[in-house]
Amino acid sequence: MISIPQTAMILSAGLGLRMRPLTETCPKPLIKVAGKELLAHNLDLLAKASVDTIVVNIHHLGAQIQTFLDRSDYRDVIISDETDRLLESGGGIKKALPLLGSAPFFVMNADSFFINGPQSNLHRLAEAFRPDDMDILLLVAGGLQITGYDGLGDFTMDAEGVLSRRPERVVAPFVYTGVALIKPTLFTDTPEGPFSLNLLFDRAIANRRLFGLRLDGEWLHVGTPDAIATAEARLAYGATTTGL
């Protein structure tokens, strides 16, 4: 029987600079795609995977996110407040560790979401995670699974699922979807204050303990105003986020 992590953190404190001018008055996690907030897309995915405790960090226009949660069906979500100081992805998670517990937990970015195939991708991550061999397991996507991303990719992956960084001036086949399963103990020897999760990724790479799992389904990256229409067109074409 799969043991599903019961805690998750959605990274929602970014400034959303690439989404301007929309984010001058609305925090990026509350930008709507197909009539639903980006944050809500991710909250629903976690709820469908039976994750009980969800932490959301806030900074830019954070009061709006708090109000949204208070007025919605997501009232049990826990806020980690970074209003006074933006801590980046790694620092934000480190601040929230007392809320996340001592077991491995999910991490999700609020500026994208995925569409499940026949099986929950969060359940697939939990099933594939081997804590004796892995420090971090990333959900990655490639090729036709991706909508709204035009970069060169992030990682290569060997036959065992071990990830390596994309070499300079080379196109890599896999993109990090912003979804991961990670051990809280990795934050023990990390800086106080702001730092990126890339610090932990690189440490894990050095020890061959950063692994990837290919997404079963589709990934929609919503990084700019133009990407909203692209994602909505893909959803209208027939994709759905309602499946497990």
Image (cartoon, rainbow, N blue to C red):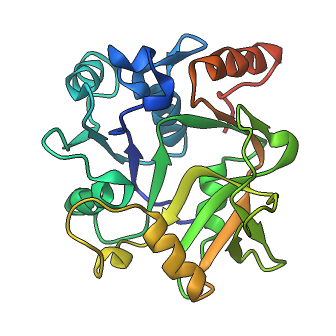
Residue 163: x and y in percent read 69, 73
Please determine whether, in this image, residue 36 is positioned above or below residue 46: above
Question: Which residue occupies 81% across, 19% down?
Answer: 238
Residue 93: x and y in percent read 32, 58
Where on the picture, by quarter, is residue 39? top left
Question: Which residue occupies 66% across, 28% down?
Answer: 241
Nearer-the-camera pick, 55 or 3 = 55
Please determine whether, in this image, residue 180 is positioned above or below residue 52: below
Residue 46: x and y in percent read 49, 42
- Say left or right for 32 vs 127: left
Q: Is residue 183 visible?
A: yes
Nearer-the-camera pick, 174 or 165 = 165
Question: Which residue occupies 44% across, 15% down?
Answer: 21
- Say left or right for 180 vs 148: left
Q: How many marks?
A: 0
Q: Residue furthest front?
A: 169
